[in-house]
Image (cartoon, helix red, strand yellow):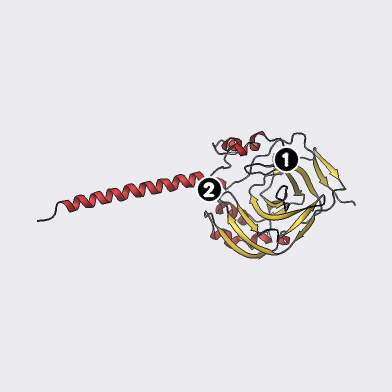
Amino acid sequence: MKNPSKPAAFVSSLLIFVLVFSYLTSTTAEHEEDEREFEYKEGSEKGPGHWGEIRKEWAPCKNGGMQSPIDLSSGRVKIIEKLGELKRSYKSCNATLHNRGHDISVQWIGDRAGSIQINGTDYFLKQGHWHSPSEHSINGRRYDLELHMVHETKDLKKLAVVGLLYKIGQPDAFLSKLMKKVVAMTDKKEYRRMGMINPAEIKMGGKKYYRYMGSLTIPPCTEGVIWTINKLIRTVSKEQVKLLREAVHDYAETNSRPVQQVNQREIHLYGPNP
């Protein structure tokens, strides 16, 4: 005679497995949702209009008076010939490529990638990341891509960001070197070692740039950041922009914060002497 308890035991074990599996998958889903602390979709509870309410330390996103990005309107710009050319001193350094979920970034180790100098102070390059479309606009026009090169003083108290704007055209040579690794990490929050990368390979061109005081463009929206935006618009291919958008998580395919109020801030444009 067959043991009648065996089918019952099997069903009981199967039920326990299903319950445990359901718990684990739901917990994982909640954890992944929690990792998305902010997003870019207008109207979302975690969108730009609510960043300042999500965390207490993110309050400047809502209440700050010197927020970035802004529109670099010709009507507001004051031409200053004494700002001087942007002093860059970059060198090769070990770097990693990082898919942070909301953007793709290249991160350099320590202070070894070199620096820029502003008003006699050295700001060391830490990382560069991309936004699409551009966050800053010029006379109301947003471009297809914007690169932010984030610099910090040795005492970690001051920040300076160099921004480059791109329109669709010829591929960007620096991005071309990263594309295979970018594709390999699509939808994956992970690092990829890149070996030695020289930031000087990021071509700027031109000698004119905008300068103003602003903030970080993602939470916590820290103010007191010196912004330097290259006036020359460089080119990037449609394919490169597409790959950068596909690599990040779906909520960040377009990862640009809306332009903020200029308020009483001055925007300077450095124009070299003829």
Q: Is residue 61 above or below residue 108?
A: above
Q: Residue furthest left?
A: 1
In which image quadrant can residue 76 be found? top right
Question: What residue is drawn where x is 64% and y is 35%?
Answer: 62
**Element type where label 1 sits in the image:** strand
Residue 139, numbered circle:
none
Pointers 1 and 2 in contact (C-beta within 8 Å):
no
Relative to the observer, which residue lies in front, 68 or 175?
Answer: 68
Relative to the observer, which residue lies in front, 161 or 16?
Answer: 16
Q: Residue type at mark 2? A: Asp
Q: Earlier in the sequence, mark 1 or mark 2?
A: 1
Quadrant of the snapshot with the N terminus: bottom left
User: Would you call the spot at circle 1 few (<14 residues within 10 Å), some (14-19), or many (20 or more)?
Assistant: many
Q: Look at mark 2 in the image and give the residue it sits on.
A: 250
Please state the total of marks drawn on the protein image. 2
Residue 16 at x, y percent in the picture: 29, 48
Q: Residue type at mark 1? A: Asp
Q: Is residue 196 above or below residue 13?
A: below
Q: Is residue 7 above or below residue 222?
A: below
Question: What residue is drawn where x is 71% and y is 52%?
Answer: 151
Residue 168 at x, y percent in the picture: 67, 53
In the figure, is residue 4 to the left or right of 142? left
Residue 263 at x, y percent in the picture: 74, 34
Question: What residue is drawn where x is 82% and y is 52%?
Answer: 120
Disc 1 and disc 2: Cα gap in Å? 26 Å
**Element type where label 2 sits in the image:** helix
User: Would you call the spot at circle 2 few (<14 residues within 10 Å), some (14-19), or many (20 or more)?
Assistant: few
Q: Look at mark 1 in the image and give the residue it sits on.
A: 71
